Amino acid sequence: MEVDLRIIFEYLYIAIGTIGVAIIVWGVILTVFRLLKLEFSRFKHKSIYRERESVRHLFASYLLLALEFLIAADIIVTVIHPTFEEIAILASIVAIRTVISYFLEKEIDKFNKID
């Protein structure tokens, strides 16, 4: 029974991690297309500063969502292999990602207050 749960958790870890990576890739694709569209409109002598900031914050929101999935995947892998080393690695990863998430969220909130 224990082996079966480990296999289930490993598949869950892979699935959630893959979803996190897919969210990042999808955000990059959307951001690149939107940015290219804006840059081409710049050739028509239009100011795109505000729109470029909007695209930047859209990408940041995708990164935030992906980070949440990646943290969840890291927690699951620690449940699978609960060694002290794995717990220390998880703690450092969660701390780094939490700091990144905090500042990205702060940046998004700042942009939303300006609108």
Image (cartoon, helix red, strand yellow):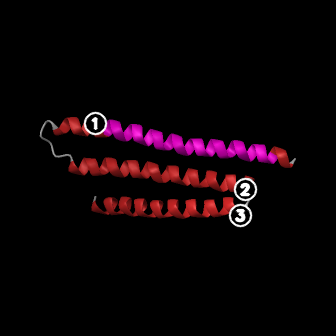
- Of labels 1 and 2, earlier in sequence is 1
Residue type of the residue flagged with mark 2: Val
Q: Nearer the viewer, residue 3 or 66?
A: 3
Label located before the other in sequence (1 or 3): 1
Q: Is residue 44 left or right of residue 11?
A: left
Q: Nearer the viewer, residue 43 or 6?
A: 6
Viewer-nearest of discs 1 and 3: 3
Q: How many marks?
A: 3
Asked whether the beta carbons under mark 1 and mark 3 sit within 8 Å of each other, the answer is no
Please state the horizontal and vertical placement of residue 44, each as a whole percent of the image: 13, 36
Horizontally, is 18 left or right of 114 in the view? right
Q: Mark 1 sits on what residue? A: 36
Q: Check if mark 2's residue and mark 3's residue have beta carbons within 8 Å.
A: no
In the rendering, at what x and y percent does residue 38 appear? 24, 39
Horizontal side, residue 80 vs residue 62: left or right: right
User: Which region shows up in magenta?
Assistant: 5-34
The amino acid pointed to by label 3 is Phe
**From this viewpoint, which residue is outermost toward the left?**
45
Residue at 68% x, 61% y: name it.
Answer: 85
In space, the residues marked 1 and 2 are separated at their CA atoms by: 43 Å
Q: Residue at label 2? A: 79
Going from N to C along the chain, the mark reached first, 2 or 3, is 2
Across and down, in percent, residue 101 comes to: 47, 60
